[in-house]
Amino acid sequence: MNLFGEPDSETTDEPTDRARRRRRARRAVMASLTALLLLACLGVGALYGVSEHLAKRVERVPGVFTDLPASGRPPEAATTDASTTFLLIGADNGTEEHTTGSAASTPASAGSQRSDVIMIARLSADRRSAAVVSVPRDSWVDIPGHGKGKLNSAFAFGGPSLLVRTIEQLTGVRVDHFANVDFAGLRGIVDALGGVDVAIANDTATDTPQGPVRFTKGINHLDGHSALAYVRQRHGLPRGDLDRVERQQNLVRALVKKASSNDTYTNPRRAYDLLHAVTRMVSVDATLTNDELRTLAFALMSLDPNALTSLTVPVAGIGEEEGLSVVRLDTTRGAEFWKAFESGSVDRYLRAHPAETQPTTPQ
């Protein structure tokens, strides 16, 4: 899948390009019609007030970057590079209760939960393409001040700052922003979209506190509850945590596809419900301003799903450390991989290593 969602110049197919432009034009028209409808109902001032109101509700996490050591971080990107890198986590305390965002009854604290989903996303400077890399939670890594351990332990030991520091040390990529959504929040976001469709390779089932959830081979329509079961399941999958990581990526693609679809663009109520759900259930670092949040929200809702590249960091295999099952990362291939990620050339990396292309129908 091409990071920029475009063919190479040598092989450009003019009819394909024209069709792509028409699709983008239709999407822009739909977005404009929705905006006009909202404007007609609310007026320009009220519309800004709604977006400002929603942005203000997003919980800010203080000290994510100010608590990092002044030295030792990867260098900042060149001033000519306006891309943005996010560390995204999905935290899970094993309950159905909100533990982050303004919907949480109490603020999350270090040690109260572990980061079950860990992704690093790079949004291109023009906001038209993105690459999202999953790092397995069971990756055996160096955690500053704590020695070797599973990657998700960093969040439990020292919260967002220690996780950012661990990720930057592991990848050599500087993190610009941090965002956290708990698993209960993920459920709410899926429901706000009216559910999502995912492809599944084989029949599987998993137990939840509300009873078993079954998935069938082929396309499955997931509501918030079944989506939560889908990304939580590890037992019964051939490769355990690695298959779960691919499921998480699969759900991200489905969310982006649904959020950028005409069903969302032409339905102001659904668009508002989505923004309402996200702003209540997500926490971000304190350096992310309301203006940046609004720009980011509209960019993600208009992102062409074909311009989203999802993949997993190179893995050497599964092993055991201190009686724990762990994922061993391929540090040699990883150095090449993260360099490609940081420079926005993941598409070229995947052409050189096609076996690392993410499956569109995971277990």
Image: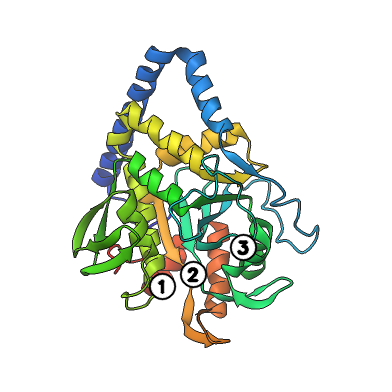
Q: Amino acid at mark 2?
A: Pro
Q: Left or right: 209 with respect to 49?
A: left
Q: Quadrant of residue 104?
A: top right
The numbered mark at residue 242 is 1
How many numbered marks does the figure carry? 3
Q: Position of residue 97 (x, y in %)?
A: 47, 50
Q: Measure the alpha-carbon separation of dots 3 and 2.
A: 14 Å
Q: Residues within 10 Å of mark 1 (few under 14, many from 20)?
A: many
Q: Position of residue 202 (x, y in %)?
A: 22, 70
- Of circles 1 and 3, which is in front? 3
Q: Residue at x 28, y 37 (%)?
A: 23
Between 337 and 33, the one lying in front of the other is 33
Q: Residue at x 32, y 35 (%)?
A: 264
Q: Quadrant of residue 309?
A: bottom left
SS at mark 1 in the image = helix
Q: Amino acid at mark 1?
A: Leu
Q: Position of residue 299 (x, y in %)?
A: 46, 38
Q: Measure the alpha-carbon separation of dots 1 and 3.
A: 20 Å
Q: Which residue is mark 3?
A: 155
Q: Which residue is mark 2?
A: 136
Q: Amino acid at mark 3?
A: Phe
